[in-house]
Amino acid sequence: MLLTRKNTSSISTGTRAHSGLVASLSRGLSHAVPTIDRRAFLRRSGLGVGAGIAASQLSLVKKAEAADPAAAGNGTGKVEVKRTVCGHCSVGCAVDAVVENGVWVRQEPVFDSPINLGAHCAKGAALREHGHGEFRLKYPMKLVNGKYERISWDQALSEVSAKMLELKKASGPDSIFVVGSSKHNNEQSYLLRKWMSFWGSNNTDHQARICHSTTVAGVANTWGYGAMTNSYNDMQNAKAALYIGSNAAEAHPVSMLHMLHAKEAGCKMIVVDPRFTRTAAKADEYVRIRSGTDIAFLFGVLYHVFKNGWEDKKYIEDRVYGMDKVREDVLAKWTPDKVQEVCGVDEATVSKVAKIMAENRPSTLVWCMGQTQHSIGNAMVRASCILQLALGNVGKSGGGANIFRGHDNVQGATDIGPNPDSLPGYYGLAEGSFKHFAATWGVDFDWIKKQYAPGMMTKPGMTVSRWIDGVLEKNELLDQDSNLRGLFFWGHAPNSQTRGLEMKTALDKLDLLVVVDPFPSATAAMAAMPGKAGDLNPNRAVYLLPACTQFETSGSCTASNRSIQWREKVIDPLWESRSDHMIMYQLAEKLGFAKELVKNYKMQKIKGMDEPVPEDILREVNKCVWTIGYTGQSPERLKAHMRNMNVFDVKTLRAKGGIDKETGYSLDGDYFGLPWPCWGTPELKHPGTANLYDTSQHVMDGGGNFRANFGVERDGVSLLAADGSFSKGADLTTGYPEFDHILLKKLGWWGELSEAEQKAADGKNWKTDPTGAIIRVTMKNHGCHPFGNAKARAVVWNFPDPIPQHREPIYSPRPDLVEKYPTHDDKKNFWRMPTLYKTVQDKNKDIVKTFPLIMTSGRLVEYEGGGEETRSNPWLAELQQEMFVEINPRAANDRGIRDGDQVWVKTPPMAAVPEFKGLKVRALVTERVDAGTVFLPFHFSGRWGGMDLAKYYPEGAMPVVRGEAVNTATTYGYDSVTMMQETKTTVCQIEKA
């Protein structure tokens, strides 16, 4: 399959003439059959449940009303094509939405997109349904006597804000925890972190905590930035690719286009996974490991690299600190027999993988949540980084650490959104950081400080993975005045979190629960269903506020490769839904800080109500987030990229010429989406950075080097790059620290700033200079990197294990290995609360006798995330109608289970809840998993211990497909750096129902 673009006539954004193409695209909703016919995979679906779903959808389509019903569907109405981006995974597939008289009637993948090349997965192909779905949350609702009742927006906003202020007065601002969303666009993510700062708490977080927080921490502490180093597209340049803990064929389907093209060019593909996945089916080599043993495998590979002298010695000498210590550790601890004992892979296989990676450079390494969601996830991702450093693959086209993120804007939400330990751009919580943002926001620093409880402004908040314990833990053990009493789920699926049984108890004990979401989510049903006697707080108030989708507003989103794309607004908000940033503003009005929140933004009228203009929010981001280069991507540049996708090269993402007709902007030399860091002001016209740390390119062409973020020396050894290691064309040809006003003055470059710039930048560094002049002079005039030129760290002294160490999961199936590879010691105060490691592991050392199967989880191609949105889509629900567990034939036969049987999945936490029988799911007997492992998808909710929760959803707003949530069954266990939950490795038993 050659990846070539389909040559079509360009269709510009805006109102269209009645061309043949537009006429064919512009069938009204009352003529829905062409939409169904277009999706052949749906047309071929069987009868039964699916047919009923399709029929109900057709009746829904008839209900839609256009501005002029008589004109709808006949091509005589106003037809527009709005360019947007798929709202599911992080690949960033572009979509052209055809809108007739305000109704979204058709969609087409964008063939000019260098990312998706006109392709869609099942979820992308069914995207239009989110703009029409009848299962949306339509109105504000309140839980009254166990049932949801419709209320007005005025009542909802007034009651929610009054309750918030009541809790703040009684228990302080930290008594409320706000879970943001990886579905928010960049502007909303940024605004929510600003909103929380004005509320006065760092108790805010989002989905990245429980998907890739270990990646961000591990990778950033190795070489500077915690993000994908290259791109999906650049994988076409790889000669070998190792996927470990990534099932891209289902989780990131369109990304496989680029890998398959690489395979056509000879790339060797290796997949390492406990399960034979659809990705593994495309591999040249498949390696099955025991879940949770990635370090043993990776360092087993590294053992053979060192033994055979395959490491890149010059690269290590110039650009890596501490590899000698890693070599010593690996050769001593990870001999082939030890590797096989821990992960189950024999020497010949491990050696073969090492040889493929070494002999086919540049070779890339891909990982996802299969590697991150462990109690040692931070160490696992560092082991991956170290292998790539040893091979000299980082900072090379075709190499790198290609980390595939999950949601459409989880990267952007991580970069500039609601994190408990940082302000936007990973600025820390020091007072200097708050002062930097206070200046940008135009508010007084002391005013912000007064919103916080004394001493809490600079203290990291709780994490979303542990809000349950923020409610339930003994107050004297928490590092804040009050337990959590209020909770916002602002676009978050509760079934994506572990310890679901305890979560139900925590939900019942709250004083305030607010769900802000286009769908009611599993939260609504969990809150409404009866819990244990005595748990329910009689004063609890529960509200559901309908947010619109990203197709009913505009804004930017950041794909996994750091490219930023601008979504046009496709349709107006449906029903009574409102945009997330409008809701933030309206709550701020009630809470008393609306003026401060939006003082830098113009307001626009949406359905007669004020809403901050997204472009103005992005312009504010451009003025302050220097750390990661979110400053060069002005709305105007991003929109020009979206209008002119055809000029960008598929392999390099770089524009070859091109002038934007609307603005006259020259696209030549830009990388698509201006992947961050895009340095300096938009006027500097930095092209973005396609491949991080690439010294073969000038910094003004997207080149770079490793970041000097950890000092200049350690134990007398320099941490800066060696002499002769520098970015192409740099005036400084050796390592150097990050730039500030002092270094510029010492080098004699200070005079290159204007007098006004000198005044503003004096006493500042490149991260806090409000003019961007330090960056401009350093890069444009002298070819140097503002963040310095240092070595990557193979040894990280600020982590629990400076060199990654294998440690058995908290719930391990191998008691013999627990003694050899024990977990960490307990922590008394970690992210504001005690966290247990060794205590839990020791208590459950022999748990395998009762629960002998390893339980792991993952994605399906049909659904995404917690699944509420995709399981409410009739077309996708038709494709995957039931929750299931994959079990090996040997394990099934030993338990008297046949394919298709209903079974109970039981795990250790259920012992504390005798009335809870387990997860009742369908058995899929398959050799995809080995005899000691079972797999469950994590997209389901709406059933609880065999009980259907349909009656507990708001009327008419329950998902089409409901099933047991795997995380109802998952166990306690958290990463020792980031508090990532351990979902990929726990234990269970399965019985026939």
Image (spheres, rainbow, N blue to C red):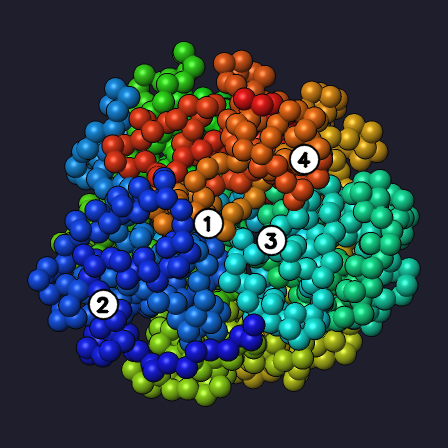
Q: Residues within 10 Å of mark 4 (few under 14, many from 20)?
A: many
The residue beneath circle 3 is 278
Q: Nearer the viewer, residue 529 or 614?
A: 529
Q: Position of residue 449 (x, y in %)?
A: 41, 44
Q: Which is nearer the N-term, disc 3 or disc 4?
A: 3
Q: Please, what is the three-letter code of the amino acid marked with disc 1?
A: Glu
Q: Please, what is the three-letter code of the amino acid marked with disc 4?
A: Pro
The residue beneath circle 2 is 26
Q: Quadrant of the N terminus?
A: bottom right
- Mark 1 to mark 4 CA distance (whole Å): 25 Å
Residue sitting at 22 percent across and 79 percent down?
Answer: 19
- Mark 1 to mark 3 CA distance (whole Å): 13 Å
Q: Please, what is the three-letter code of the amino acid marked with disc 2?
A: Ser
Q: Please, what is the three-letter code of the amino acid marked with disc 3?
A: Arg
The residue beneath circle 1 is 862
The residue beneath circle 4 is 889
* Among the 4 quarters of the image, the one containing residue 230: bottom right
Residue sitting at 61 percent across and 66 percent down?
Answer: 259
Q: Position of residue 778 (x, y in %)?
A: 57, 77
- Above or below — where is 885 with respect to 323? above
